[in-house]
Amino acid sequence: MRAVVWKGPYEVTVDEIEDPRVEESTDAVMRLTTAAICGSDLHMYEGRAPIEPGQVFGHENLGVIEEVGSAVKSVRPGDRVVLPFNIACGFCFNCARGFTNACLTVNPHSHGGGYGYSGMGPYRGGQAEKVRVPFADVNCLKLPGKPGDAFEDDFVLLADVFPTGFHATEQARVLPGDSVAIFGAGPVGLMAALSAKIRGASEIYVVDAVAERLEKAQALGATPVDFSKGDPVQQILDLRVPHRKNVQNLQRGAGDKMPGVMCAIDAVGYEAWAHDGAGKTQNPTQVLDDVVAVTNPTGHVGLIGVYFPQDPGGVDEDAKKGRFTVALGNAWEKGLSVEMGQCPVKKYNVYLRDLIVAGVAKPSVLVSHRLPLDAAPEAYRKFDERTDGYTKVLLKPQQSAA
Ligand SMILES: NC(=O)c1ccc[n+]([C@@H]2O[C@H](COP(=O)([O-])OP(=O)(O)OC[C@H]3O[C@@H](n4cnc5c(N)ncnc54)[C@H](O)[C@@H]3O)[C@@H](O)[C@H]2O)c1
Ligand SMILES: [Zn+2]
Ligand SMILES: [Zn+2]
């Protein structure tokens, strides 16, 4: 079969490799109908995460079950399923408590497993014609309908970015009426904006410097903030003034002491651009500084963008070891809650599927490109450069196979 294979920094190719097969009685093999490229793939693509040549990419996988092992009970060949990007066993100490992002049995070297990702176990990715699914009963979410129907491009986003954006709003404890600032209008930031809307936030600000992405944020009902036009924290404080006037008699004592938002989300991570250097100068602590600065005392911060313990391309010796200087004193003084880490997709995917089926959420509004597998090398290059409107690329492995 054909698959997207990493060769070295900024180089992926579509190669012929061996088909996956059922290796354990609890496995299934799925034929892909759609596989998305993720912003997380770009860290590896650029060589900014430890990775070996030959890695097959792809952790956002949707398709049809082709074969199941003898112990698999709940899925059958022909079933349409989407796979959480986390691979989980379902029975370990962490899985049993709902933390499928930190499964203790699927990765011999660490907690947490995933498809086609550095440090997440010996699993091939799904940017390919087929993928092996460990513990299929746990890791398959069944879906209605038929491949290629009106929900195809929504359902693939249940593998990662829709649940991940929703999890960011859990981390930042977004409640009805809340004010929310989201840094990054990539797929994760946009899905956080959609989720904040679903949860009833009253003010949602989305910060980026890429025009097409900010337009998508606006279409989702958020207020776009372009950080290339000035300090985004000050812009949000200014935009909040009329809202504060509306409630100033109701929020006793708030006055100028609560000028920011109650909830802030970092959907950028360590590959952040400095304010004055969009696309030129990286500053891995830019967004960490901004979320602390923009959040009110007693507010909540979610760090969904990644900070790896090792970054061979880090801007300095500390950054190479995942050590970052943050305004902890300010955060402590404000009494902020800060939550971070990988999303446990299985905690949310059922509910979000049902929102899609009910017509309440249409996450595929963020999709910019639908391409055959062979287009992957060019798609990676353009998505990495954030040019030509490349926001979310869906690969269609069956198109290229035809
Ligand atoms: N925690 C998880 O489970 C999880 C899951 C998926 C992705 N992620 C991570 O979330 C992050 C976002 O993913 P994505 O797919 O949306 O990636 P992306 O790279 O497409 O989006 C990041 C966006 O941030 C913008 N940006 C850069 N510097 C900025 C700054 N200083 N202020 C505001 N915006 C800035 C970029 O222009 C870009 O549009 C990545 O770090 C990714 O690895 C985490
Ligand atoms: Zn992803
Ligand atoms: Zn487990």
Image: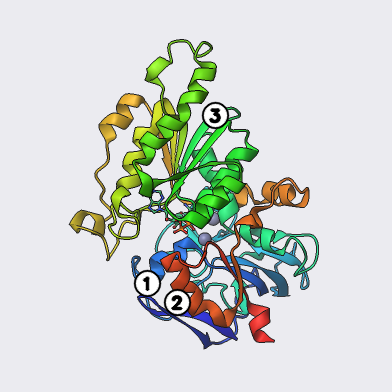
Q: Residue furthest bottom?
A: 16
Q: Nearer the viewer, residue 379 or 159?
A: 379
Estimate the spatial distance between the alpha carbons at disc 3 and disc 2, rounded to whole Å: 42 Å
**Does residue 190 appear left or right of residue 264 in this picture?**
right
- Image marks 1 and 2: residues in contact by CB distance under 8 Å: yes
State the quadrant of the C terminus.
bottom right
| Label 3 secondary element | loop
Categorize mark 2 by other alpha carbons within 10 Å: few (<14), some (14-19), many (20+). Answer: many
Point 65% across, 39% down: residue: 198
Residue labelled with disc 3: 178
The image quarter containing residue 225 is top left
Do callouts 3 and 2 mark residues in contact (Cβ within 8 Å)? Answer: no
Q: Decide: few, some or many residues near mark 3? Use Cα within 10 Å; few <14, some 14-19, many ≥20.
A: some
Q: Is residue 280 above or below residue 349?
A: below
Name the residue carrying label 1: 51
Amino acid type for the residue under numbered disc 3: Asp
Nearer the viewer's eye, disc 3 or disc 2? 3
Asked if the residue under mark 3 is in contact with the one under mark 1, i.e. CB atoms within 8 Å, the reply is no
Residue farthest along the right direction in this orientation:
145
Q: Nearer the viewer, mark 1 or mark 3?
A: 3
The amino acid type found where label 2 is placed reads Gln
Lateral position of residue 356 relative to residue 7, left or right? right
Vertical placement of residue 7 versus 97, above or below: below
Q: Tell me the SS state at disc 1.
A: loop
**Can residue 344 be seen in the rendering of this structure?**
no
Earlier sequence position, callout 3 versus callout 2: 2
Residue 197, horizontal then vertical, whole percent: 61, 39
Residue indicated by mark 2: 55
- Name the image quarter holding residue 367: bottom right
Disc 1 to disc 3, C-alpha distance: 40 Å
State the image coordinates of residue 323 (x, y, percent, origin top left). 25, 50
Q: Evaluate whether residue 338 shows in this view.
A: yes
